[in-house]
Image: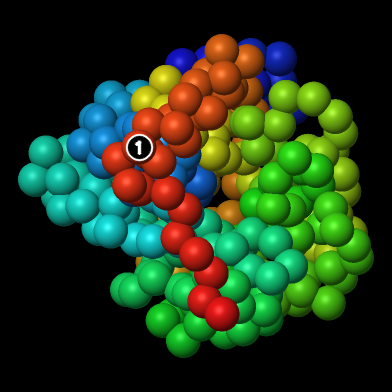
Amino acid sequence: MTGTRSGTSEAEPPEAVGPRSRSFVDLHCHSSASFDSLASPRSVVRAAASRGLTHLAITDHDRIDGALAARAIALSEAPSLTVLVGQEIKTREGDLIGVFLDRAVPSGLAAVEAIAAVREQGGLVGIPHPFDSHRGSLLAGGAMDDLAPLVDWVESHNARILIGDGNQRAAAFAADHGLPGIAVSDAHSVLEVGVAYVAVHGDPSTPDGLRASLRTAELVTGRATVFVRAVTPIAKLVQRMRGNGRLAPNP
């Protein structure tokens, strides 16, 4: 696995980046529970553990059953990896990431309602790929300054943004609003797991611990390849044929 550490030209695998007291965290990853991924929860867990990640948030679209399965698999087969149960939540204004969830947040809520639903569970909220015009990005459709005080981080580097200045604009937005900017893989395939992540001090296994650790996170900013991105339309087609299309938002 390769990437670029923030402030350097080369990056090393997580296990070589620093002392074992550090944690290596990817807060945006999909499994085959998503309508656009074919990566089984077991294969995602194995990839993350083998590449030295210590914490992985499974954030499938609209649901958390894949994350729950991955957490159970990690407990028995990859004890060095902590799986955080999350979800990529489709709101009326765009996508959000919720982590530390016990139940799925309904699609189609207003963004503030979705944030409140995550907070009711004691979870944390992030803004994914905020300036990516090709996806359900909160900030691409208009000013979202009002949401900034309500969230815990912004994806200032999403490894699936291959063209444009979306990551640079996201980093500037995070800095302007005093929010941690993080790096994520947004993996939809096993090859992408951990291609981008953050290295942190402290214990990111709890909401309070993760929130505190992100303040001084070091970003490792790898990117997905065009080939890997090209697999996504195929995954959507296969999932549709399997009857695993995207869940319809609540009316």
Residue designated by label 1 = 241
Query: Which residue corresponds to the image point at 46% horizontal and 86% vertical from the top-left?
Result: 120
Task: Tell me if mark 1 has few (under 14), some (14-19) or many (20+) residues whose alpha carbon lies within 10 angstroms of its own.
Answer: few
- Above or below for 170 versus 145: above
Please state the horizontal and vertical placement of residue 243, each as a whole percent of the image: 33, 47
- 207 left or right of 143? left
Please state the horizontal and vertical placement of residue 59, each as a whole percent of the image: 44, 53
Label 1 SS: helix
Query: Which residue corresponds to the image point at 34% horizontal and 61% vertical from the top-left?
Result: 64
Would residue 46 be seen by someone viewing this image from the given angle? yes
- Above or below for 212 versus 183: below
Query: Which residue corresponds to the image point at 69% horizontal and 38% vertical from the top-left?
Result: 157
Number of marks: 1
Please state the horizontal and vertical placement of residue 192, each as a whole percent of the image: 47, 25
- Above or below for 182 versus 78: below
Nearest the eye: 53 or 104: 104
